[in-house]
Image (spheres, rainbow, N blue to C red):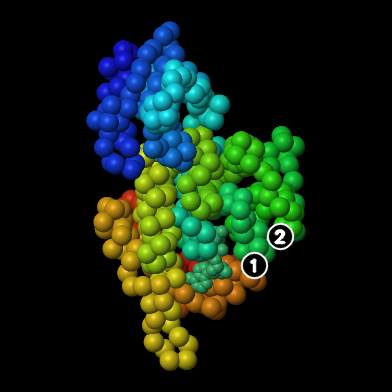
C-alpha cells in the first residue's frame, strides 16, 4: 500500500463547503505507510469541527481493508495561521501538525447486534419534528404486521420513549448472564437513556460516555429474536450518530422532516452525513404534513405543501409517505399508549398513512414478501 494507492482510495473525499475534492484542492499534504500504520496529514483550513469528524470517519472507512482505526493517524495543518503571522511581519513558527488519533474515537470493529434481524436508525435534522412519535408508531405498525420490534432511545437530549410507551418509572434489570433486559410495553421492547437518568437532572453525560452507554444498549442487552431494532437518534449530526454508525452494523436510515424549509435544510445535512458514512438510506418521511380541521373539515398545509417529497426527489432518495397532524397522535403520546395500537383510531388518515409507510419500509428490507393484512384483528383478539 503506497501513498498513491492510499490517495486513490480517498479520491471521493470532498470539501463540503466548495464540493471540490481534497485532491483537487491539494489538501493531502503527506501520506505514508510504515509497517501497517498509515499516517495522513491534511490541510483542514476552513473545515468545521463537525465536518472534520465526518471526513476522518470517511478516511477510516475507506482504508478499513488495509488498517484498523487504531493504525490510522490523522494529522492536520492549517494554512491560515501561517498567513496571519506573515501579515503582522512575525516569523511564522513551523506548522506543528496537531496529533489526532482517530482510533480513540472508534476502538471497536463494526459489530452486528446479536439476535437482531435489521437495525434501523431514525434521524432528523432538528428536534421537535416528531421523530420519537414516528419511531413508536412505526414500531407499533410493524408489530401489527407480525414483526418483533425493539426500540433504543438514543436521544440523550430528549429521551421521550419511556413517556410515549407509558413506562417512565420502570428501571431495567439484568439477567443472570449480566445482559440488560429491555423493558416491555404493549408488546414492544425498549431501552432508553431516560430510564437511567432522573428526568429533573441536567444532562451531564458527554461524548465518550454516551457512546459507551449506547454500545451497552446495543451489545450488552438481550435483543434476541427481534426482527427490527429501531434507533431513535438525537437530532442533528453529532457524536452519537457517528459512534452508532462506526461501531454498529446498521441496515438502513430513515429521515423525518416537516415540510418547512428550515427543517428540510437540517434534514438534508443529516442525510448527507449518513450518505458519507455509507449508510443505506431507506427514505424520507414528511411529518405534520397537513392538518384536517375538525370544525371546517378543510385540509391545511400549515408547514408548506409537499416539501419533503420534492426534496427527496432532488436528493435522489425514496419518499416513504406523509403523516398528517392529528390531535389524538399527541394525546396518545401523552397517555403512553401508541396511536397505532389503539383500535379506536382504525381507518383514520393518520392510521392509514402509518400503515402505508411501514409497509414500504418492511418491503425495503424484505423485498418480495407480501404485506400481511388482517393481523390487527388477531392481535386485538388475544
Ligand atoms: N403528526 C403529528 N400530529 C400531532 N402531533 C404530533 C405529530 N407528530 C408529533 N407530534 C407531537 O409533536 C411533539 C414533538 O414530537 P416528538 O416525537 O417528541 O419529536 P422529536 O422526537 O422529533 O423531538 C410531541 O408533542 C408530539 O406528540
Ligand atoms: Mg424525540
The image shows residue 244, relative to residue 78, as above or below, that is: below
Left or right relative to 224: residue 237: left
Mark carried by residue 231: none
* Residue 75 drawn at (x, y percent): 45, 23
Residue 267 at least partly seen:
yes
The image shows residue 356, relative to residue 272, as above or below, that is: below
Given residues 130 and 250, the one toward you in this image is: 130
Q: Residue at x 31, y 58 (%)?
A: 312
* Residue 250 drawn at (x, y percent): 45, 41
Give the mark nearer the N terminus: 1 vs 2.
2
Mark carried by residue 336: 1
Residue 366 at least partly seen:
no
Disc 2, ligand 1: is the CB inside 8 Å?
no
Disc 1, ligand 1: is the CB inside 8 Å?
no
Quarter of the image for the N terminus: give it.
top left
* Residue 93 drawn at (x, y percent): 46, 19
Splitting the image into four quadrants, where does ligand 2 fall? bottom right
Under circle 2, the secondary element is loop
Q: Residues within 10 Å of mark 2 (few under 14, many from 20)?
A: some
Q: Residue at x 61, y 53 (%)?
A: 157
Given residues 176 and 93, the one toward you in this image is: 93
* Residue 106 drawn at (x, y percent): 53, 30
> Answer yes or no: do the residues labelled 1 and 2 have beta carbons within 8 Å?
yes
Q: How far apart are labels 1 and 2 at the CA level?
A: 9 Å
The image shows residue 65, relative to residue 310, as above or below, that is: above
Q: Residue at x 36, y 40 (%)?
A: 276
Mark carried by residue 168: 2
Q: Residue at x 42, y 29 (%)?
A: 88
Left or right relative to 194: residue 62: left
Amino acid at each position: 500500500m503506497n501513498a498513491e494507492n492510499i490517495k486513490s482510495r480517498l479520491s471521493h473525499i470532498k470539501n463540503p463547503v466548495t464540493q471540490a475534492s481534497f485532491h483537487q484542492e491539494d489538501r493531502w499534504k503527506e501520506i505514508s505507510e510504515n509497517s501497517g500504520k498509515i499516517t495522513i496529514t491534511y490541510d483542514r483550513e476552513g473545515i468545521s469541527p463537525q465536518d472534520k469528524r465526518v471526513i476522518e470517519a470517511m478516511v477510516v472507512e475507506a482504508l478499513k481493508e488495509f488498517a484498523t482505526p487504531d493504525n490510522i493517524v490523522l494529522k492536520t495543518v492549517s494554512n491560515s495561521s501561517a498567513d496571519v503571522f506573515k501579515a503582522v511581519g512575525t516569523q511564522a513558527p513551523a506548522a506543528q501538525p496537531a496529533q489526532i488519533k482517530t482510533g480513540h474515537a472508534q476502538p471497536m470493529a463494526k459489530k452486528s447486534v446479536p439476535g437482531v434481524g435489521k437495525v434501523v436508525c431514525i434521524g432528523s435534522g432538528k428536534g421537535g419534528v416528531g421523530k420519537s412519535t414516528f419511531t413508536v408508531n412505526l414500531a407499533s405498525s410493524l408489530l401489527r404486521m407480525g414483526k418483533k420490534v425493539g426500540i433504543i432511545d438514543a436521544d440523550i437530549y430528549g429521551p421521550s420513549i419511556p413517556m410515549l410507551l407509558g413506562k417512565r418509572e420502570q428501571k431495567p434489570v439484568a439477567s443472570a448472564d449480566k445482559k440488560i433486559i429491555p423493558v416491555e410495553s404493549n408488546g414492544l421492547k425498549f431501552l432508553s437513556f431516560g430510564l437511567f437518568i432522573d428526568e429533573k437532572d441536567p444532562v451531564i453525560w458527554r461524548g465518550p460516555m454516551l457512546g459507551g452507554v449506547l454500545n451497552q444498549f446495543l451489545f450488552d442487552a438481550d435483543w434476541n429474536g427481534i426482527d427490527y431494532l429501531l434507533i431513535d437518534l438525537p437530532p442533528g449530526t453529532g457524536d452519537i450518530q457517528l459512534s452508532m454508525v462506526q461501531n454498529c452494523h446498521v441496515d438502513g436510515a430513515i429521515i423525518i422532516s416537516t415540510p418547512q424549509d428550515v427543517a428540510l435544510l437540517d434534514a438534508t445535512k443529516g442525510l448527507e452525513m449518513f450518505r458519507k458514512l455509507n449508510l443505506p438510506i431507506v427514505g424520507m418521511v414528511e411529518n405534520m404534513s397537513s392538518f384536517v380541521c375538525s370544525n371546517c373539515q378543510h385540509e391545511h398545509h400549515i408547514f408548506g405543501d409537499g416539501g419533503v417529497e420534492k426534496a427527496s426527489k432532488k436528493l435522489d432518495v425514496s419518499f416513504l409517505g406523509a403523516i398528517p397532524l392529528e390531535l389524538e397522535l399527541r394525546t396518545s403520546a401523552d397517555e403512553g399508549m401508541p396511536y397505532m395500537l389503539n383500535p379506536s383510531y382504525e381507518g383514520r388518515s393518520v392510521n392509514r398513512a402509518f400503515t402505508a409507510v411501514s409497509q414500504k419500509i418492511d418491503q425495503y428490507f424484505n423485498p418480495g414478501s407480501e404485506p400481511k393484512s388482517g393481523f390487527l384483528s388477531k392481535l386485538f383478539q388475544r
